[in-house]
Image: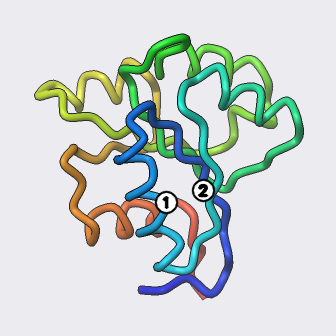
Amino acid sequence: MVSDFKKLILVVEDDRDIRSSVMEVLENAGFRTSCASNGAEAIEALRRGLVPDLILLDLMMPVMDGFAFRDEQQKKPEWASIPVVIMSADGNILAKKERAGTADYIRKPLDIVDLINVIEKHILAPA
C-alpha cells in the first residue's frame, strides 16, 4: 500500500548500501525519509528538531549502537513516544526487541512487503 500521509521515517543504519536501499524502498512507497549512520547522529538529528513518525533502527553500529540510542531516546518524553522498529540479522531478535523495548522488529535481509507492513502497522491510523 502506498502512503498518502507522507509520514517521516528516520533510518538509522551504519551500512550505506542497506541505508540507501531502505530509504529508496520507503520513498517509492510514499514515505519521506531521513537517515543517520549511527545512534549518535540520530540523537543529534532529534536534538536539531527532527520529528520522525517512526524510527527504523539497526542495533549493531559503531559510535553509538542501537541499545545506547534507545537509552538516550527514552530520556526525553517527546522522543520516547516515537515508535521504533529494530532491523537485525541476529537469530535472537525477539529477545533483543524486548531488551531494547521497541515497538517491533524486522529481520535482515529485509523483505520489502514485510518492511512496509510493519511500518504501516505502527504509523498509519485507520481511516
Q: Who is closer to the viewer here, 5 or 41?
A: 41
Q: Position of residue 73 (x, y in %)?
A: 67, 24
In what quadrant of the picture does the C terminus appear? Answer: bottom right
Q: Identify the amino acid type marked 1.
A: Met
Residue density around tag 2, few if under 14, some if 14–19, many if 20 or more, within 10 Å:
many
Asked which secondary structure carries label 2, the reply is strand
Q: Who is closer to the viewer here, 17 or 81?
A: 17
State which tag comes first along the sequence, 2 or 1. 2
Q: Position of residue 57 (x, y in %)?
A: 46, 37
Q: Residue furthest left?
A: 91
What number is the disc on residue 23? Answer: 1
67, above or below 111, in the image: above
Q: Residue at label 2? A: 9
Asked which secondary structure carries label 1, the reply is helix
Asked whether the beta carbons under mark 2 and mark 1 sit within 8 Å of each other, the answer is no
73, above or below 13, in the image: above
